[in-house]
Image: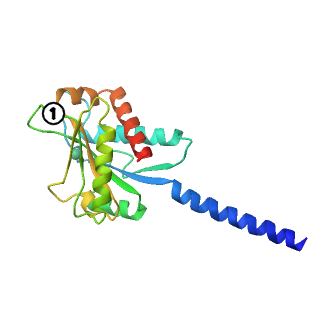
């Protein structure tokens, strides 16, 4: 009897251990750094009701809803902001380092004086301590995200100080279209377009 209890205890312990490591390895955490917010509206154009900051929040929140409905439970999405709040660069970096995700993805929408410039661009910082992994992830995400109405742009390096340079995890910035481009602007100004984009980014993060 004593032996039987002992064996059961060992099996239970082993099962517990395997399920722990299992869970740890399978659940990928991604922090979505939702650009701008509050007093910092980002890009704002007259013929679209939303600013860059609210468009990004809507896309990020749509991703959160998809995450909540996802029965696989293999991806956990965390946002740096859940409302129209202003966050400093420092706060964003601290938040991301504290959560310590597998990937930090900053989301922005571009604006360019060249109105033909459009589509999705991805950035990585060579100064990020995981720069090689960040570059690979930026490439993969660019290939994957840009299959919808937004065309594929290029992988670039940021010109100025940014979140993705200073966080201690692999990081990329995605430019989700250009508000200065008519076709991108029309796509982003509809809920259908934003939801489609959110769904695609989520899918890309899952298969990455
Ligand atoms: Zn921006």
**Residue at position x 26%, y 58% in the image:** 163
Task: Determine which quarter of the picture holds residue 87.
Answer: bottom left
178 and 23: which one is in front?
23
| Left or right relative to 200: residue 21 | right
From the top left corner, tell me how far across and down residue 182 is, in percent.
Answer: 18, 27
199 and 78: which one is in front?
199
From the top left corner, tell me how far across and down residue 207 is, in percent.
Answer: 43, 44
Which color scheme is applied? rainbow
Q: Can residue 87 be seen in the rendering of this structure? A: no
**Residue at position x 32%, y 46% in the image:** 140
Neighbours of disc 1 within 10 Å: few (<14), some (14-19), many (20+):
many
Q: Can residue 120 be seen in the rendering of this structure? A: yes
Image: 166 above or below 74: below
**Residue at position x 80%, y 69% in the image:** 7
Q: Mark 1 and ligand 1: say if the CB distance to the nearest ligand atom is below 8 Å.
A: no
**Residue at position x 11%, y 32% in the image:** 115
From the top left corner, tell me how far across and down residue 190 is, in percent.
Answer: 31, 26
Residue that mark 1 sits on = 180
| Left or right relative to 169: residue 176 | left
From the top left corner, tell me how far across and down residue 107 is, in percent.
Answer: 29, 46
Image: 76 above or below 133: above
39 and 132: which one is in front?
132
Image: 91 above or below 72: below
Q: Residue furthest left?
A: 113
Task: Determine which quarter of the picture holds residue 94.
Answer: bottom left
Label 1, secondary structure: give it. Answer: loop
């Amino acid at each position: 009897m004593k032996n039987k209890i002992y064996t059961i205890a060992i099996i239970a312990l082993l099962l517990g251990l395997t399920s722990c490591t299992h869970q740890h390895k399978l659940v990928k955490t991604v922090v979505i750094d939702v650009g701008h917010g509050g007093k910092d509206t980002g890009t704002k154009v007259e013929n679209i009701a939303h600013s860059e900051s609210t468009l990004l929040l809507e896309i990020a929140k749509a991703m959160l809803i998809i995450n909540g409905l996802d029965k696989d439970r293999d991806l956990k999405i965390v946002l740096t902001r859940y409302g129209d709040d202003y966050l400093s660069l420092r706060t964003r970096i601290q938040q991301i380092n504290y959560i310590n995700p597998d990937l930090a993805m900053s989301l922005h929408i571009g604006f360019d004086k060249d109105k033909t410039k459009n589509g999705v661009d991805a950035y990585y910082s060579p100064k990020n301590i995981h720069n090689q992994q960040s570059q690979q992830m930026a490439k993969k995400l660019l290939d994957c995200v840009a299959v919808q109405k937004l065309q594929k742009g290029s992988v670039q390096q940021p010109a100025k100080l940014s979140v993705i340079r200073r966080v201690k995890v692999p990081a990329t910035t995605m430019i989700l279209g250009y508000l200065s481009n008519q076709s991108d602007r029309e796509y982003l100004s509809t809920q259908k377009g934003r939801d489609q984009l959110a769904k695609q980014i989520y899918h890309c993060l899952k298969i990455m």
